[in-house]
């Protein structure tokens, strides 16, 4: 819940309802976690304030793919409405950019003629995760190629480090540690 709060998906009132905290306690918890987060990732503070400034100037925020979301509430006199608008701006910039990058990866993947990747059947997407069905004997080879493909497709100034989990169903997944031989 706190990660969702940091990204802007939920605010103090929803966090309070979910956790049994009072709204004041939830706000204090959010502030404390946000302070730790910004101390750990100092460039995020300038990114977040930059997004807020952009929305105030132009009335909208955009994703890396250029999709715009208008946020007129950013100029509200009501601080609760304005705070919600700030979360919306932050969330839009981060989550929609992640969706843009994932979409680009899927398009590139569909155009790829690699025989190993052909064994992977994309069956679903949940937020920023892709679900593939892969024959058990091909899991490591497919996972290694998918990770390499993602790193090649998505070029950012920060590394993209995909996580791979495998299992027969959602309830029984485990992290997959790739070996050097699977990365060939």
Image: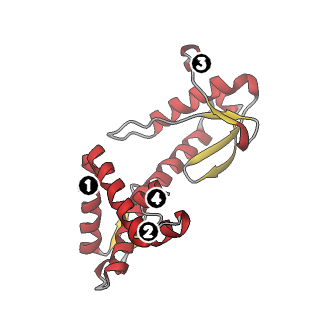
Q: Tell us which disc is closer to us: 4 or 2.
A: 2
Q: Is residue 69 left or right of residue 82?
A: right
> Which of disc 2 and disc 1 is earlier in sequence?
2
List x then y, in percent, for residue 84.
39, 73
Residue 45 circle label: 1
Q: CA distance from mark 3 to mark 2?
A: 43 Å
Q: Quadrant of residue 116?
A: top right
> Which of disc 1 and disc 4 is earlier in sequence?
1
Residue bearing mark 3: 182
Residue bearing mark 4: 96
Q: Is residue 66 visible?
A: no
List x then y, in percent, for residue 137.
74, 22
Nearest to the observer: residue 86 or residue 153? 86
- Local SS, label 4: helix
Q: CA distance from mark 3 to mark 1?
A: 39 Å
> Which of disc 4 and disc 3 is earlier in sequence?
4
The crowd level at tag 1 (other Cα within 10 Å; few <14, some 14-19, many 20+) is: some
Residue at the (58%, 34%) spot, across then down: 164
> Which of disc 2 and disc 3 is earlier in sequence?
2
Nearest to the observer: residue 23 or residue 130? 23
Q: CA distance from mark 1 to mark 2?
A: 18 Å
Residue bearing mark 2: 11
Residue at the (39%, 39%) spot, across then down: 155
- Local SS, label 3: helix
> Which of disc 2 and disc 4 is earlier in sequence?
2
Q: Quadrant of residue 177?
A: top right
Tell me whether the residue at label 1 lies in contact with that at label 2, contact meaning CB atoms closer than 8 angstroms: no
């Amino acid at each position: 819940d706190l990660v969702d709060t940091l990204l802007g998906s939920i605010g103090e009132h929803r966090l309070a309802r979910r956790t049994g905290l009072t709204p004041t306690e939830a706000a204090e918890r959010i502030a404390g976690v946000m302070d730790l987060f910004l101390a750990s990732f100092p460039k995020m503070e300038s990114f977040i304030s930059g997004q807020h400034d952009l929305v105030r100037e132009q009335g909208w925020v955009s994703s890396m793919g250029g999709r715009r979301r208008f946020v007129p509430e950013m100029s509200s006199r009501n601080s609760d409405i304005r705070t919600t608008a700030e979360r919306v701006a932050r969330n839009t910039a981060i989550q929609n950019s992640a969706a843009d990058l994932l979409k680009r990866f899927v398009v590139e993947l569909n155009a790829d003629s690699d025989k190993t990747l052909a064994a992977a059947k994309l069956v679903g997407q949940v937020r920023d995760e892709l679900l593939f069905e892969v024959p058990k004997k091909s899991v490591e080879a497919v996972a290694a190629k998918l990770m390499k493909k993602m790193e090649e497709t998505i070029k950012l100034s920060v590394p993209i480090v995909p996580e791979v989990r495998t299992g027969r169903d959602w309830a029984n997944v485990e992290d997959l540690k790739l070996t050097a031989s699977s990365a060939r």
